[in-house]
Amino acid sequence: MHRRLRRAHFDEQATLEGFDFAASPKLPAAQIRDLAALRWLHSGESVLLHGPVGIGKTHVAQALGHLAICQGAEVRFYKTSRVLAHLADGHADRTWPKRLGELARPHVLILDDFAMREYTPQQADDLYELISERAQAGRSLITTSNRNPPDWYPLFPNPVVAESLLDRLINTSHQVFMNGPSYRPNKRPGRAVPQSTTNAK
């Protein structure tokens, strides 16, 4: 388990137990706790976490990944931009098939900051191949995004690629809208607030 946790490349060892659901009454606590049962993992389904900045999407994504590791799954966590840069390097040195295979292999792939900006045609094609490869193998995907899934379509230069990729992803996934205010670093869900701060008037 410790080896799997290291290989996951998490930014932090986040857990749902360490997530402060009380920080915002608008958070879909029941839906998130239901995802903790990992039925989506056993069915090869995806989880799309979306909402405003600072609400705790990345924490929840990593916490779900941590739970999957506890059940024996291999998990990888990456910023989407890093994955695209990794695949772009594969085009340059002719290792693209190997790199794609490495990203397609884990039971759960977490793509943080998905759909942050418009994609180039090559980036769109790489995402299409990656997500299609994982879907065919029954591998799960978790994404975090500041945009609602229907707003992802214009980010892809080729409408055909957008339809083929996103319709399959969006329509067969668990979508979690995490709404609420953006928090300062010491008040974000999952982070304890110092006692002196909570007592301050």
Image (cartoon, grey):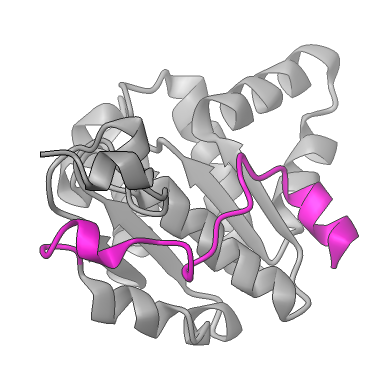
Q: Outermost residue, right direction?
A: 3
Above or below: residue 83 compared with residue 37 = above
At 16% from the left and 40% from the top, the residue drawn is 151
Above or below: residue 129 compared with residue 134 = above
Frontmost residue, 137 versus 199: 199
Frontmost residue, 121 versus 52: 52
Frontmost residue, 39 versus 71: 71
At 10% from the left and 39% from the top, the residue drawn is 201
Above or below: residue 96 compared with residue 16 = above
At 28% from the left and 38% from the top, the residue drawn is 54
Main SS, magenta region, reads: loop
Percent x, y for residue 144? 38, 47
| Drawn side of residue 109 relative to residue 118, left or right | right
At 21% from the left and 47% from the top, the residue drawn is 51
Quarter of the picture containing the N terminus is bottom right
| Drawn side of residue 43 relative to residue 60, left or right | right
Percent x, y for residue 153? 23, 39
Q: Is residue 180 magenta?
A: no
Tell me the magenta residue range: 1-27
- Residue 102 seen in render: yes
Q: Is residue 17 magenta?
A: yes
